[in-house]
């Protein structure tokens, strides 16, 4: 189990920290210092809880990364690196507002989608490196196994051995509820490292967009560099990209609210601490 992964997960957990306290201006490192009493280290408490949870259940890494991406990309609701905190929760949470890039999106369209959030191509490649952990349900890539782009044939860019293995997991015409690891290196599926990039260079990507990252001229050089430069380099760049993602369309000051429960907006007239 990688210490790098544990540290990354703790940092990601801090991104979600939503506690009572006055929020004015931009995000900042150590925002909650002194907010709950002079000697209470709020961010240290959160870090400890997330670290403990990670060593009990390694899948929490993928869950937190996914939540961070969805939260920031939809409506703004990361080795070791400083995480800015202090973002407030939005007042609206509607399924109709969700417009996330699909797994079949092309690289140019994905670059455009990220650019719309103030993130560049390099940020996008680093953030999609979050697929170094986690799984995908068969229905998200089943077309690549049997009927890619309505050709009646599998995706020609998929490694043949991988294709055969995935067909056993995801039978044709099945409900698509089974899952496959996004990083197909069995020694690394739960570790935050650069193995994901090595796999997609070897044409062992699960999602269409993942595989196309390694093939499209727009992103190919960046992916190759990440695959060859080692885990420490990726961890640093991934952390920086996650911090940048955390500042997308951020709500501060009098915008939004500090929820009493992360699951729902506060009731009208409900007292919040500032």
Image: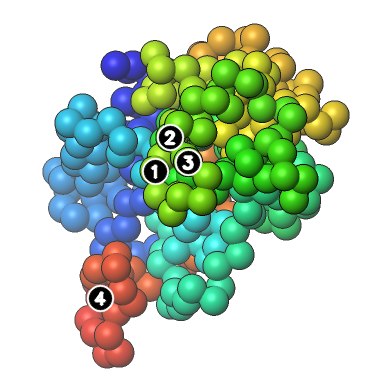
Q: Which residue is mark 3?
A: 171
Q: Indicate the quadrant where residue 216 lies.
A: top right
Label pair 1/2, CB-CB below 8 angstroms? yes
Residue 258 point in image, percent of width and height: 33, 68
Residue 58: x %, y % from top left = 28, 31
* 165 or 80: nearer the viewer: 165
Q: Nearer the viewer, mark 4 or mark 3?
A: 3
SS for callout 2:
helix
Q: CA distance from mark 4 to mark 3?
A: 51 Å
Q: Are marks 1 and 3 in contact (CB under 8 Å)?
A: no
Nearer the camera: disc 4 or disc 1? 1
Which callout, 4 or 1, points at the residue further toward the start of the chain?
Answer: 1
Residue 178's disc number: 1
Q: Which residue is the site of mark 2?
A: 169
**How far apart in space, not on screen, are marks 1 and 3 (Cα)?**
10 Å
How crowded pointer 3 is (Cα within 10 Å; few <14, some 14-19, many 20+) is rated as some
């Amino acid at each position: 189990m990688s210490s790098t992964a544990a540290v990354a997960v703790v940092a990601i957990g801090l991104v979600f920290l939503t506690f009572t306290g006055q929020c004015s201006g931009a995000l900042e490192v150590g925002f909650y210092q002194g907010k709950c009493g002079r000697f209470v280290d709020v961010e240290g408490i959160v870090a400890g809880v997330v670290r403990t949870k990670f060593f009990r259940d390694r899948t929490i890494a993928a869950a937190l990364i996914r939540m961070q991406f969805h939260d920031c990309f939809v409506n703004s609701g990361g080795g070791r690196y400083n995480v800015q905190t202090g973002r407030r929760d939005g007042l609206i949470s509607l399924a109709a507002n969700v417009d996330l890039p699909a797994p079949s999106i092309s690289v140019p369209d994905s670059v455009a989608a990220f650019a719309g959030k103030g993130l560049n191509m390099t940020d996008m490649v680093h953030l999609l490196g979050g697929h170094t952990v986690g799984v995908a349900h068969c229905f998200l890539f089943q077309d690549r196994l049997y009927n890619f782009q309505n050709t009646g044939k599998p995706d020609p860019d998929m490694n043949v051995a991988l294709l055969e293995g995935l067909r056993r997991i995801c039978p044709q015409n099945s409900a698509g509820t089974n899952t496959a690891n996004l990083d197909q290196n069995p020694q690394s599926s739960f570790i935050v490292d650069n193995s994901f990039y090595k796999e997609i260079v070897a044409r062992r990507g699960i999602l269409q967009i993942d595989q196309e990252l390694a093939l499209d001229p727009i992103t190919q050089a960046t992916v190759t560099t990440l695959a060859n430069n080692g885990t420490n380099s990726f961890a640093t760049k991934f952390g920086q990209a996650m911090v940048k993602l955390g500042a997308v369309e951020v709500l501060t000051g009098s915008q939004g609210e500090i929820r009493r429960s992360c699951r729902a907006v506060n009731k009208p007239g409900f007292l919040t601490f500032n």
